[in-house]
Image: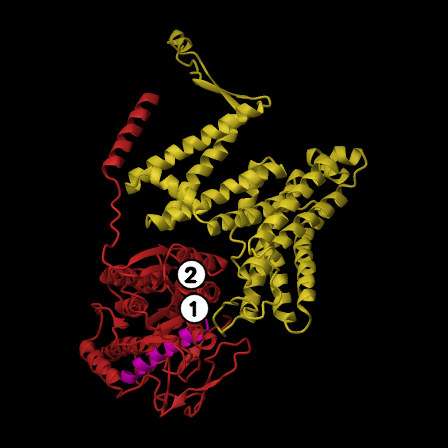
């Protein structure tokens, strides 16, 4: 017994030595070393999206990188950022909203290192030369995904499966946060641009990742008569609930077609690679990184996946047309002529762009007939937090 | 004839107290065995050289000055929670509520920082934070103790349930105090004014917790081993009837001890919120209220030994997460390794308490 164990061990050891890990450091000459902080690991669709983009950008540019996964939104983030700076990184990035304050702390301690943070809101008010926010005009992606949903609803109405009045969508959101509200409102407006009778119900889970709550939320919406579901939360809860119930689903962060082959319509997501290439390029060239950077369809930051097999006919053409119009500026997602708030058109809205504990509105966002979301001179993270007519909030505890 | 029962080939004997060097030897053997198993698992699953893995575990804990400081700070926090549970455990009062007691302590600190900023001087804010967080932790310990003392309720259940109440309270106040609206996050409190931030000692962010942990370790050791109250705790733990017979007021001892236990947990909450994170979240205690149960048990409820057991846990923890960074492995792999090592360390306690005697093979032959 003992002897055989020893042998086994010896064989295993020898095998190891023969397959020594190959650590190919990128040999290309560059002055940039990048460090990335992720809230979870690749099992979360949200983080996976960042991880893939970071790998892609670093490999394209021949930049050496360090990943730190599973970093909570607390002092651990500050420590991880400092450790990356200690390790020689001159570009440090964090992917989760709650990382922001700790990145600012680290940025104060390391003035020579550029700290970039996705989804944050404070760079434009902190005005530090080495702390930057980034986001993408994902509301445009959501709008396009909404068109896919609207086309599907039209198909269902034409096939006699539902009446026009029964065209009700459901949406599983995380928090009543502007990013979520902006997301589902643009999704809804996209759907309504092709299916005028559509209404929507939104439920909130109070977590960015809670598989059970998201599944229950989707089931509740389906029981409530919603015939199409979308979500802004990071687990597979809602898509799998839809697949089980046979209800079409518009996904987020990436394709869920492998788990939901029958009900997957499309997914919008942010491709972060263009931002990473921009920011790391700035570090390499010694240029200043913008305090707020908003990627869009033109930069390749806002993307749609391939369409699922369940989409209505002519969907691709409708998306292509709308996409061209969005890029050309012919249409605006939050065109105030297309929606009402408490029965009235929105003529003025003071958006809460500068973060403060009293949530005071500080920037006039309605100019030239549309709400300027994630716009130049505001900030990159969404701030559209208006409840428009046609969308019903089911529970707003969060 | 055939009904003869086959005797098992080994049997267990409870050992008398093992000499300390033998017990230490068994523990070292367990750690070595754990390392070997981890090495084999690592190699088989990932093809990475185990020596490199061990080097990176060590570097994860002590690779840079910053890492070393963080390691000791984390040891201090885990040690403090373990120390907090210990008086209760010595009394055989199973306080599983460390997590909740830490949380309410932290919540009380955060409340002072948020509600009193700019209203009263900073020194007064900090003073109130100390009072409130210790008080909150103590109350969270007092409630189960009161019910145990009065009606002999099961303290394991009640302390455990108090954890959930604490978590929900923090979740509720997170929504009340969230910035920006709807985000579900409080963020760093008073980031620009630093009101309510505990002072740095000698320019180090990390030293305060470490010094407090060292002081509490010594004080608690003296309290438990040399004071009359510490003796009362031991007697109540051995036998409540004996305690009553010799005139100890058991109810009083239970309540007093849990006030201390909860109060120290509240102090940890203060350090986590006022000194380290400067925010409060439902996960700020990070499960350490439960890890501390293990740390305290592994140290046989001895405060001095606890320094080593908590160090061991933190060392493994930090090392394990370094592995996932260095080799690009999933975080779960680090958990697997930690699990293996803990399995061996806890398992070896069995061999310290029991001896395995093997029967002679010859005897087996006769029966056939």
Membership of A177 in magenta stretch: yes
Q: Quadrant of the N terminus of chain B?
A: top left
Q: Quadrant of residue B52?
A: top left
Name the tint of chain B in the rendering.
yellow
Chain on which label 2 sits: A
| Side of A12 where A85 appears, left or right | right
Give the red chain's letter.
A
Q: Main secondary structure of the magenta part?
A: helix
Q: Is residue A37 left or right of residue B24?
A: left
- Mark 2 and mark 1 lie on one chain; the one further toward the N terminus is 1
Magenta run includes residue A326: no
Outermost right residue: B247
x, y percent for residue B127: 69, 62
**Residue A73 image point, x, y percent:** 46, 61
Question: In this rendering, does residue B161 appear at all?
Answer: no
Q: Is residue B227 left or right of residue A226?
A: right
Numbered range of the magenta stretch: A175-195
Q: Residue furthest top?
A: B366
Q: Which residue is mark 2?
A: A210
């Amino acid at each position: 017994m003992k002897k055989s164990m020893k042998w086994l061990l010896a064989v295993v050891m020898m095998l190891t030595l023969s397959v020594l890990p190959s650590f190919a450091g990128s040999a290309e000459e560059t002055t940039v070393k990048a460090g990335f902080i992720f809230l979870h690991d690749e099992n979360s669709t949200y983080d996976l999206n960042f991880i893939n983009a970071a790998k892609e950008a670093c490999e394209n540019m021949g930049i050496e990188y360090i990943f730190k996964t599973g970093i909570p939104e607390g002092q651990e983030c500050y420590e991880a950022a400092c450790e990356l700076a200690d390790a020689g990184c001159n570009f440090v990035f964090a992917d989760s909203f709650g990382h922001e304050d700790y990145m600012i702390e680290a940025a104060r301690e390391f003035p020579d290192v550029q700290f970039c943070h996705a989804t944050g809101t404070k760079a434009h008010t902190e005005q530090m030369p080495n702390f930057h926010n980034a986001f993408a005009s994902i509301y445009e992606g959501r709008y396009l995904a909404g068109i896919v949903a609207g086309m599907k609803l039209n198909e269902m109405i034409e096939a006699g499966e539902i009446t026009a009045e029964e065209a009700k969508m459901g949406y599983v959101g995380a928090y009543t946060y502007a990013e979520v509200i902006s997301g589902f409102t643009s999704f809804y407006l996209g759907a309504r641009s092709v299916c005028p009778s559509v209404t929507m119900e939104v439920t909130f889970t109070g977590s960015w990742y809670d598989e059970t709550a998201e599944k229950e939320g989707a089931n509740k919406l389906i029981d409530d008569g919603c015939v199409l579901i979308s979500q802004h939360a990071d687990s597979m809860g809602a898509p799998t609930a839809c697949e089980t119930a046979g209800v079409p689903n518009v996904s987020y962060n990436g394709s869920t077609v492998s788990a939901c082959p029958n009900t997957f319509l499309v997914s919008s997501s942010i491709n972060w690679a263009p931002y990473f290439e921009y920011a790391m390029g700035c570090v390499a060239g010694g240029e200043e990184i913008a305090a707020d950077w908003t990627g869009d369809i033109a930069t390749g930051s806002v993307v749609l996946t391939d369409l699922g097999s369940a989409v209505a006919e002519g969907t691709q053409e409708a998306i292509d047309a709308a996409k061209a119009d969005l890029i050309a500026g012919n249409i605006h997602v939050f065109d105030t002529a297309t929606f009402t708030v408490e029965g009235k058109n929105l003529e003025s809205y003071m958006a809460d762009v500068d973060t403060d504990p009293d949530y005071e509105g500080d920037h006039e966002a309605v100019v030239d007939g549309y709400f300027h979301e994630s716009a130049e001179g505001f900030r990159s993270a969404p701030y559209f937090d208006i409840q428009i007519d046609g969308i019903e909030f089911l529970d707003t505890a969060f | 004839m055939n009904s003869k029962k086959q005797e098992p080939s080994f049997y267990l004997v409870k050992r008398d107290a093992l000499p300390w060097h033998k017990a230490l030897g068994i523990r070292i053997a367990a750690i070595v065995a754990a390392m070997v198993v981890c090495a084999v698992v690592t190699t088989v699953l990932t093809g990475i050289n185990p020596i490199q893995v061990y080097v990176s575990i060590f570097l994860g804990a002590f690779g840079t000055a910053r890492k070393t400081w963080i390691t000791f700070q984390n040891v201090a926090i885990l040690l403090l929670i373990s120390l907090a549970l210990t008086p209760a455990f010595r009394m055989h009062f199973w306080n599983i509520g460390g997590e909740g007691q830490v949380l309410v302590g932290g919540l009380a600190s955060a409340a002072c920082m948020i509600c009193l900023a700019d209203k009263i001087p900073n020194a007064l804010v900090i003073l109130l934070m100390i009072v409130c967080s210790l008080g909150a932790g103590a109350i969270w310990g007092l409630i189960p103790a009161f019910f145990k003392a009065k009606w002999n309720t099961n303290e394991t259940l009640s302390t455990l349930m108090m954890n959930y109440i604490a978590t929900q309270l923090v979740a509720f106040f997170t929504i009340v105090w969230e910035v920006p609206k709807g985000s579900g996050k409080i963020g760093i409190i008073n980031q620009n004014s630093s009101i309510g931030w505990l002072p740095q000692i000698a320019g180090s962010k990390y030293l305060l917790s470490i010094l407090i942990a060292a002081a509490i370790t010594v004080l608690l050791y003296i309290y438990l081993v040399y004071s009359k109250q510490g003796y009362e705790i031991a007697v109540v733990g051995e036998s409540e009837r004996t305690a009553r017979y010799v005139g100890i007021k058991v109810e009083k001892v239970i309540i007093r001890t849990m006030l201390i236990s909860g109060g120290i947990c509240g102090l940890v909450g203060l350090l986590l919120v006022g000194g380290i994170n400067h925010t409060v979240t439902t996960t700020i205690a990070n499960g350490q209220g439960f890890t501390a149960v293990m740390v305290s048990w592994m140290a046989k409820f001895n405060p001095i030994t606890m320094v080593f057991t908590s160090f061991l846990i933190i060392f493994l923890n930090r090392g394990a997460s370094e592995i996932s960074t260095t080799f690009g492995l999933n975080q779960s792999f680090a958990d697997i390794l930690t699990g293996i090592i803990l399995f061996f360390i806890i398992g070896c306690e069995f061999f310290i308490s029991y001896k395995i005697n093997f029967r002679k093979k010859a005897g087996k032959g006769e029966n056939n």
